[in-house]
């Protein structure tokens, strides 16, 4: 009788662990499909392999000099570059205080007809910040200088 109870307990633990593992896998796939798991792209990667319009993307690079145009209200358009390619970005909202031309930025949103319709803009967090994507692209082109 005691052996039967022990075996039932072990079986229950194994089934519980299998269910927990399955639930974790399902949650991971659901988050990835909703775009919560974000993959960063450089403008060159976007030019080579544009993502589908329903895929949430995160593009990092530099705000191209002279590209910031303020529209009506809080709408702003600008270009993000890695010095090899550029991606036009449209954003409606208040830009971060540290958003300036020639500095690092990460824009997140959906690419529609070659224009990133950003839902969020992240700017450098101090005077030396540059997104990893921009640093990698500049290093690959031999124009990155460490300060």
Image: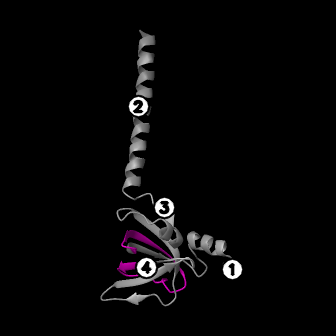
Tell me the residue that label 4 is attached to: 88
Query: Up-down: is 119 above or below 36?
Result: below
Q: Which mark is nearer the camera, 3 or 2?
A: 3
Foreground pick, 40 / 96:
40
Query: In the picture provided, is 132 more to the left or to the right than 91?
Result: right
Find the magenta span and give its range: 88-115
Q: CA distance from mark 2 to mark 1?
A: 54 Å
Q: CA distance from mark 4 to mark 3?
A: 18 Å
- Which residue shows up at 46% across the image and 84% down it? 97
Query: Up-down: is 113 above or below 99?
Result: above
Query: In the picture provided, is 26 more to the left or to the right than 142?
Result: left
Foreground pick, 39 / 51:
51
SS of the residue at dot 3? Answer: loop
Tell me the residue that label 3 is attached to: 39
Tell me the residue that label 2 is attached to: 16
Tell me the residue that label 1 is attached to: 145
């Amino acid at each position: 009788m005691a052996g039967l109870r022990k075996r039932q307990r072990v079986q229950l633990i194994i089934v519980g662990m299998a269910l927990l593992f399955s639930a974790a896998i399902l949650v991971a796939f659901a988050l990835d499909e909703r775009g919560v798991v974000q993959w960063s792209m450089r403008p060159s990667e976007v030019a080579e392999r544009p993502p589908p319009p329903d895929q949430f993307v995160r593009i990092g690079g530099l705000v191209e000099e002279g590209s910031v145009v303020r529209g009506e209200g809080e709408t702003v358009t600008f270009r993000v570059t890695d010095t090899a390619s550029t991606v036009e970005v449209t954003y409606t909202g208040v830009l971060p205080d540290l958003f300036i031309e020639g500095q690092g930025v990460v824009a997140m949103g959906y690419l529609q007809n070659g224009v990133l319709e950003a839902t969020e803009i992240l700017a450098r967090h101090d005077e030396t910040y540059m997104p990893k994507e921009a640093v990698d692209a500049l290093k690959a082109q031999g124009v990155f200088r460490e300060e």
